[in-house]
Amino acid sequence: MDFSSFLTSLGTSFLIFIVLMLLFTWLSRRPGNSVVYYPNRILKGLDPWEGGSRSRNPFDWIREAFSSSEQDVINMSGVDTAVYFVFLSTALGILVLSGLILLPVLLPVAATDDNVKAQKTNGSNQTFSEIDNLLMGNIKDDSPRLWAFLFATYWVSLVTYFLLWKAYVHVSVLRANALMAPGLKPEQFAVLVRDIPPAPEGQTRKEQVDSYFKSIYPETFYRSMVVTNNKEVNKIYEKLEGYKKKLAHAEAVYDGSKKTGKPEGLRPTTKTGLLGLVGKKVDSIEHYNEKIKELTPKLEAEKKATLREKQQACAFAFFTNRVAAASAAQSLHAQMVDTWTVMEAPEPRQIIWSNLKIKYFQRIIRQYVVSFIVALTILFYMIPIGLISALTTLDNLKKLLPFLKPIVDISAVKTVLEAYLPQIALIVFLALLPKLLMALSKAEGIPSVGHAVRATSGKYFYFTVLNVFIGVTLGATLFKTLKSIENKPNSIVSLLASSLPGNATFFLTFVALKFFVGYGLELSRVVPLIIFHLKKKYLCKTEAELKQAWLPGDLGYATRIPGDMLVITIALCYSVIAPLIIPFGVVYFGLGWLVLRNQALKVYVPSFESYGRMWPHINSRVIAALVLFQVTMFGYFGVKKFSFCTFLLIPLPILSLLFVYVCQKKFYRSFSDTALEVASRELKEIPNMETVFRSYIPPSLSSEKADDDHFEDALSQVSRIGSFA
Amino acid sequence: MDFSSFLTSLGTSFLIFIVLMLLFTWLSRRPGNSVVYYPNRILKGLDPWEGGSRSRNPFDWIREAFSSSEQDVINMSGVDTAVYFVFLSTALGILVLSGLILLPVLLPVAATDDNVKAQKTNGSNQTFSEIDNLLMGNIKDDSPRLWAFLFATYWVSLVTYFLLWKAYVHVSVLRANALMAPGLKPEQFAVLVRDIPPAPEGQTRKEQVDSYFKSIYPETFYRSMVVTNNKEVNKIYEKLEGYKKKLAHAEAVYDGSKKTGKPEGLRPTTKTGLLGLVGKKVDSIEHYNEKIKELTPKLEAEKKATLREKQQACAFAFFTNRVAAASAAQSLHAQMVDTWTVMEAPEPRQIIWSNLKIKYFQRIIRQYVVSFIVALTILFYMIPIGLISALTTLDNLKKLLPFLKPIVDISAVKTVLEAYLPQIALIVFLALLPKLLMALSKAEGIPSVGHAVRATSGKYFYFTVLNVFIGVTLGATLFKTLKSIENKPNSIVSLLASSLPGNATFFLTFVALKFFVGYGLELSRVVPLIIFHLKKKYLCKTEAELKQAWLPGDLGYATRIPGDMLVITIALCYSVIAPLIIPFGVVYFGLGWLVLRNQALKVYVPSFESYGRMWPHINSRVIAALVLFQVTMFGYFGVKKFSFCTFLLIPLPILSLLFVYVCQKKFYRSFSDTALEVASRELKEIPNMETVFRSYIPPSLSSEKADDDHFEDALSQVSRIGSFA
């Protein structure tokens, strides 16, 4: 890519960003769109526009984002989001502090040398652009100027350690404060008990669990809830809920027809067969009412059957204080370690019920199998894409789906399809990848969504760094120098190092595209807006359906964090070789911070809260990126034949590993467990244990009636209700 | 070594054993020796001879050993000893079950082939003995007979897995039962708290610890004891105790002189200078009385000063029930993981006080440094020996210690010294090694003696296996085949494998020597007996001195277990190559079981109790030996050119690692922590917390007076003494 096309691409991206931002200022002020641009505020019962007036400065959102405190973010969007902002500002800080030294020092040092020109005169047939004069590649081999680059490598590393350490301490305090908060969090009173051995003869599962915990915690154990296999009852429950929604929809349509058409209205009809498309035509309202009447007793019967007969070898145990629960979650309960395993209970909303029953050794086996599959996916991800591409060539398509033949044979369609089919296959595969990784993470037997998201994020990180970053870098070089491969250094490190400079402009453009277009789309929410308005116009008839249409979801850490990680990896790895990347990285994280601050405060609704448990992973992955940087720099100094001084870089990776090790030792356990000094803080009021207990009853099993006599089988008796009356 | 000299050596060893056993039967029946042969029974207040009569069958000890139950061993010698017997019987079981199949199958298969003869006729200049006909070396290359050996390798491995699994389950139950026992064990009510952060302004260390634990455990926390730096007070205390002993000795001498000499007696005298050898001559009794009078108030003052001013950043916290203590020891207490680290309290008698204050990261650093030093010691242990040998050559000795010259120049002395000096250096170094390893283990910052013994035992195991087993095997081969080294297989595994058969007779003799002479000396206790009688005759005047002279010490796991491990490693590695080793191994563990059963019941007194925490280490080391066996077999089948069938052995090491992994996951944590279901067993009676607390006061700080008003500084107030009154 030469310099002018680089500028063109940069300019286009910037233009798109400006357009999207103007669109945002215009669209977000229209009251009909407030549910798209302010859903988080609306759901919290707040006024969408803080001042109450829409006639404000169109750039007020920037002021609001800057003036919002960390506590605001925690209040509106939870600790996980606040921790995500710590990550953004740490990455920003690393790049700013690095840039402050590297740009004024390295650019002049590089620009005043003339290795590039020298190579040009030597008749090397590589193309060089103006940018190349500013890169480390412009330094001659074994020049004393390389000392500046060596120093820069140390500076970047030390800045990273310093800011990461500060951030870790900060996040640790954030987490502790959140866990200490006096509000009632049901998960702090519960533990998840898995791998319960078979109940002894003459004892129900519930009696077994109760007597076990009562003997260990005679004073603090409240009651237990045996987990049941809810597959069947969930199916009926969802069917029933579906019919209820359809009924509401049909009634809304009927009401609507009364207003617009005849006064007696037009009763909507439906067909009883597949998807409402075939079968006998019936009156919708009557039909759904009938179905509901039919399913309601069936649900009740199934509920009872589930509670009585489908109990599984796992349970939740509830304690009357937080210290007891936190300490139970960390203690070994049974002499055989693979029975009665106790862990912290996830929040009720993020429990993956179907995973709870998976046994100890099966979980371990599943983990290894999944790691193996993921490693294969990462290493050989081109193969399934290639297969799909091969299958989706036109000739194959015609063979497989003969009815497409007449369409495909139109020449215009044919041209377009032939050009885009492989790319579409790639895009589809890449779009499906997070879902695949999420499914794999869940298959590990992880009990909570938050944990599964963390696991997915890790897998996706390795995928992007290995395939996008290293893949693109090495791929381009290997492709270019396929003939002269013998002249290239043998080791993968030197190869990677020597490939980096050639791809500098590619990654500059990549980062720019990511922040201008990516954050433009993020801020303007064009896609959700269009989808919402389409749904509103053609599909939604009831309030519930409308709300469903604008519900914004959460920030999506599973893919968002690996995306940011890729940028910080690129920025770090190029920081010394091509310091020009630093301003791009700064804009990426600065703009990201600003845009996402707005989105966190006004748009996204977190779907779970893990109190910052993502941080240790973020920390170690930034260090992984740093080690990659340090190792490639070691390789690149080798390529530059910087004699023995190259070995001065050897302490850096060791220092990084030491840093990770010390962080791990000093902080990690307080992220995986709850420290007792934190759990021992007094609550605002004595918790209502019944509320805590009931929050863990899945919706399909909960009963509107206040009595819980039909829970007697799976749920233990209230043992000392007197003390909370 | 040829066959006849092998038989000679075997016969000699056996003769020594018979002599030593006869000596034992004769000596142990003399009443004057009962303190040497029955100290454990005497200390427990039991009659040395169970039946009360000495005129029993001289082989009664064998009957008694066989008829004693595991419970008897636990009662007399503790769980650790019982676990050691589980190890002995498991090793015995592995060898017996292996031998039952291997001896009748492999010996005929080997004896009827004629590879050895064939090589002899080929004019190979190696020497072959009759034993070689019974080895796997007598099988021709790629013979189908090798299938029997392949099968045997699998059989030995499977037998080992099966018996180790059974043993692990058994030991786990033993440990659980011991921990559940209703008797009062102070360490079950205490935890050790280390890395306490600096006390806040205006708070004493004691107040800090108390308020911290009271806020977390308002109901179960009893009180705390801040650890002090006792170096100074211990010094004074020991001096004082020394003077008290000397005074008693002097008085006994004086009393003795009254009986034997003049009726008014001869008052003993001593010199006040170095070691009582130089200086002014004074009356001993007066002198010591004076010293005691002088030191007693000094000790009291130092006690007070220690308790007030020498408090360290660690403490013991006491709880009123076992579950609270067990659970506290496993839980994270502070948000910063490297502060307020809480772990199980060691027994009072095995606390290494000086290690308690060592900080978190310093402990980790010390561990790595020590591992590094140990690795160096193991790898280069010949170098210090070589240095010592060089220093101890006669010429050097004469230079360094010129006063020796006249003695050394006597020709007889010279000859002997020249022949033995290097060997003496080796023996001294090997004798010092356990002490060195123990000192290194203690330098790791380990807080209890039991743990340090386990760490030492591990280091010693690696040392013996690497240097004695592999060193001897490879060393001999390398020495023999120094010229033909090029023909030898290149890899260390094949080299080791091909070296094994040549050393079979060496190790047969080694094992035989170890059991006949080793266990003979063990049973007859000749050395302790002689030392005791010498001391009794010439040194001991008081009862206390006499008791000191016969106190037997403990079984010495730190060196005993590695010794046994070496034998099981040798037996496993040779089991298929030279099945003749199996009966020798059987005798070693059988005889060992018998002799040590007698010693455990009657002689040794355990110095600490770790409730079987040694077992996980034993388990993984037996598996390490098994993996060594499997890998060398893989190499040896390769040497035998057993074509692709050799690869059938690849699953075995994988299976072994899997076995260790599953054991680790299923059992290990219940050995490092106390399972709560175990700790929650009811005690026989409500514990007297004051007794528990007082058992942790070191003797130099304890006060005979009942009041503990001068403990107020380092020891917290009794908070709810009422509930235990």
Image: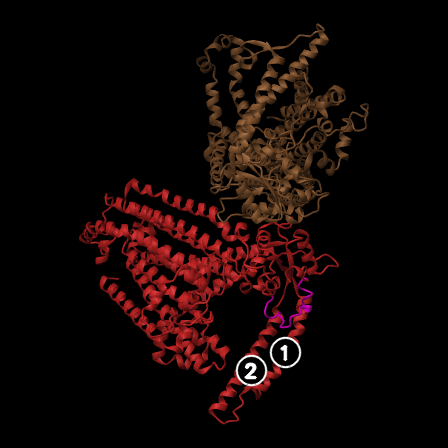
Chain colours: A brown, B red
The residue where tag 2 is placed is B247
Could you say where residue B110 lies in the image, as x and y percent from the top left? 22, 50
Q: CA distance from mark 2 to mark 1?
A: 14 Å
Q: Is residue A566 visible?
A: no
- Chain for mark 1? B
Asked if marks 2 and 1 fall on the same chain, the answer is yes
Magenta highlight range: B697-716
Query: Where B358 sits versus B159, above or below?
Result: below
Position in image of residue B17 (x %, y %): 31, 69
* Residue B354 image offset from top left, x and y in percent: 58, 64
Q: Is residue B633 above or below residue A422?
A: below
Height in image: A354 above or below B169? above
Q: Secondary structure at mark 1?
A: helix
Q: Is disc 2 in contact with disc 1, using a CB cutoff of under 8 Å? A: no
Between A265 and B165, the one lying in front of the other is A265
Q: Position of residue A441 (x, y in %)?
A: 53, 34
Tag of residue B295: 1
Indicate which disc residue B527 carries. none
Left/right placement of residue A118 relative to residue B532 reads: right
Look at the image and say whether residue B702 sits in the magenta stretch: yes
Residue at horizontal 62%, vertical 58%?
B317
Q: Where, quadrant-wise, is the N terminus of chain A in this rendering? A: top right
Q: Quadrant of the C terminus of chain A?
A: top right
Residue placed most toward the observer, A322 or A702: A702
Q: Which amino acid is tagged 2?
A: Leu
Secondary element at tag 2 = helix
Q: Find residue A156 and report its image quarter.
A: top right
